[in-house]
Amino acid sequence: MSKWRPSSYTIEQAIKEATRYDGIYVGSNYVTKDHGDYIEVCIDADNPKGHVSYDLYFDENGHLDHWEAHR
């Protein structure tokens, strides 16, 4: 059995779950970066930075465990 990697997960639902708490629309304007243990997501937003960023952490089964917003 191969090791599960975050990048093999279909991430759209996890992104929508994380961002809905900040009231940000998630269309197709986002970028993901696989850091091995977590995925960083940058989403276009109408704010001074022009984006919001989250780190998404998954359990060994590929389910979203928790997420952390960049401040």
Image: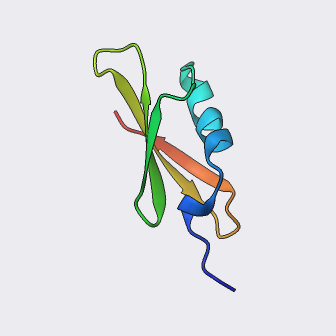
Relative to residue 10, is residue 42 drawn left or right?
A: left
- Looking at the rendered image, the quarter that the N terminus falls into is bottom right
Percent x, y of residue 32:
45, 46
Relative to residue 36, is residue 58 drawn left or right?
A: right
The image shows residue 32, relative to residue 44, as above or below, that is below
Percent x, y of residue 11:
61, 47
The image shows residue 5, relative to residue 68, as above or below, that is below
User: For the point 60% across and 62% down, which residue is it?
Assistant: 8
User: For the point 57% across and 25% down, which residue is it?
Assistant: 27
25 or 17: nearer the viewer? 25
Relative to residue 71, is residue 39 drawn left or right?
A: right
Report the coloring of the rendering.
rainbow
Give the number of callouts. 0
The image shows residue 16, relative to residue 61, as above or below, that is above
User: For the point 65% across and 51% down, which residue is it?
Assistant: 10
Image-quadrant location for residue 16: top right
Image-quadrant location for residue 42: top left
In the displayed orientation, state which residue is furthest to the left. 48
64 or 30: nearer the viewer? 30
45 or 60: nearer the viewer? 45
User: For the point 53% across and 46% down, which residue is it?
Assistant: 67
In the displayed orientation, state which residue is furthest to the bottom. 1
- Looking at the rendered image, the quarter that the C terminus falls into is top left
Percent x, y of residue 54:
45, 40
The image shows residue 16, relative to residue 22, as above or below, that is below
